[in-house]
């Protein structure tokens, strides 16, 4: 079988990808432009992708493709319906970042609550010397204990963030889906937004969740609430977030994802970088070394299971 990894550079160079246990030919490309996809997969049995897009038109030109092994959890770059109709199996990676992403989300929450970035930048600008005393109070400093964390989406990552938050004395509210009644252990979506001190997003990006948070939702939130997004960039209307920061309608935001990655310089989140209560990281919440190695190991496990006739982690 021929395996082709179209975007190997989405994993750090030091991460080891073990050779599959079956007889195979392996071809790896650091990156692949849209116009190169069909050529590179023309005689491939198995395509390995992280962020390279495989749409219906591309898949229709690859009749020999048997498996798409996604080197990530998110699958919005692969047309699953087209794979289903073509008889192509699709599998993804699961639960590999159950420590890395929750810890990153908590780091964003802590940094914003304590105004760490704002104080660091002000010290670099000479503010401490201007203050003339042992400390100064330009930015808010808040304790996590007693605050309410609102979780929108309640998969493995959200559940592990919940454990961390409870250990620090936070209260947790789990949101029902937007527009749906709240079941046991859940609160209505709007109520979570209105009551939470921190709203953290952990949803997949679908037609139903695109722009889940927009002008209406920002108006519901407390004026000092924080919004955390380590899920998908499209979950938030980025122009509405910029407006909320400009108008002091929320207390701050910490994002690890953007609708378009890398973002253009005129993206609203790039324009928000000068605000002391906004933190943007380059989609690295998942990328602890241990998490990436687990991903790489599970990727090969998925491929070997498929070839052995026992496909696992199937989306299609």
Image: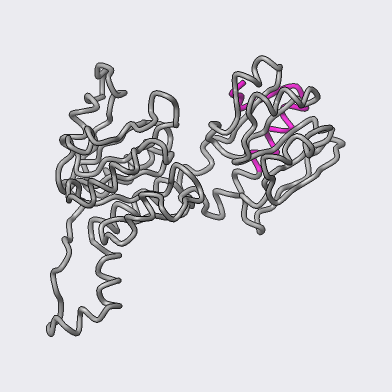
Seen from the viewer's position, the closer of residues 39 and 91 is 39
Query: Residue 284 in the image: x percent, y percent?
Result: 49, 52
Q: Residue 187's quadrant in the figure?
A: top left
Asked if 308 appears above or below 104 in the picture, the reply is above
Residue 312 magenta-drawn? yes
Taking the spot 70% from the left edge, 17% from the top edge, the residue there is 86
Query: Residue 74 in the image: x percent, y percent?
Result: 53, 35
Left or right, residue 92 beside residue 188: right
Left or right, residue 284 beside residue 227: right
Query: Residue 205 in the image: x percent, y percent?
Result: 44, 31
Residue 227 magenta-drawn? no
Asked if 260 appears above or below 180 in the picture, the reply is below
Q: Residue 4's quadrant in the figure?
A: top right
Quadrant location of the N terminus in the rendered image: top right
Colour pattern of the rendering: one colour
Q: Which residues are the magenta region?
A: 297-316
Asked if 71 appears above or below 61 in the picture, the reply is below
Quadrant location of the C terminus in the rendered image: top right
Query: Residue 117 in the image: x percent, y percent?
Result: 30, 65
Taking the spot 15% from the left edge, 68% from the top edge, the residue there is 138
Q: How many marks?
A: 0
Taking the spot 30% from the left edge, 55% from the top edge, the residue there is 278
Q: Residue furthest front?
A: 266
């Amino acid at each position: 079988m021929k395996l082709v990894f179209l975007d190997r550079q989405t994993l750090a160079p030091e991460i080891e990808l073990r050779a599959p246990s079956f007889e195979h030919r392996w071809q790896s490309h650091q990156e692949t432009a849209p116009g190169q996809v069909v050529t590179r997969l023309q005689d491939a049995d198995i395509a390995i992708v992280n962020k390279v897009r495989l749409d219906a038109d591309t898949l229709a030109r690859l009749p020999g493709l048997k498996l798409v092994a996604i080197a990530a959890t998110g699958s919005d770059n692969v047309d699953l319906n087209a794979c289903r109709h073509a008889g192509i199996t699709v599998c993804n990676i699961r639960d590999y970042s159950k420590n890395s992403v929750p810890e990153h989300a908590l780091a964003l929450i802590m940094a914003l609550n304590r105004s760490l970035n704002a104080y660091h930048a002000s010290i670099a600008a000479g503010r401490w010397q201007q203050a003339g005393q042992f400390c100064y109070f330009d930015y808010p400093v808040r304790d996590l204990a007693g605050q309410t964390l609102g979780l929108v989406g309640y998969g493995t990552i959200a559940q592990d963030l919940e454990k961390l938050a409870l250990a620090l004395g936070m209260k947790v509210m789990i949101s029902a889906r937007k527009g749906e009644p709240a079941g046991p252990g859940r609160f209505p979506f709007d109520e979570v937004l209105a009551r939470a001190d921190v709203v953290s997003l952990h949803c997949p990006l679908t037609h139903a969740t695109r722009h889940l948070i927009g002008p209406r939702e920002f108006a519901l939130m407390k004026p000092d609430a924080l919004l955390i997004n380590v899920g998908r960039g499209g979950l938030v209307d980025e122009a509405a977030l910029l407006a909320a920061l400009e108008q002091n309608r929320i207390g701050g935001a910490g994002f690890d994802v953007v609708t378009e990655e890398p973002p253009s310089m005129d993206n609203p989140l790039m324009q928000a970088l000068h605000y002391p209560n906004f933190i943007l990281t380059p989609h690295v919440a998942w990328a602890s070394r241990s998490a990436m190695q687990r991903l790489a190991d599970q990727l090969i496990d998925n491929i070997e299971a498929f070839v052995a006739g026992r496909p696992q982690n199937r989306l299609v």
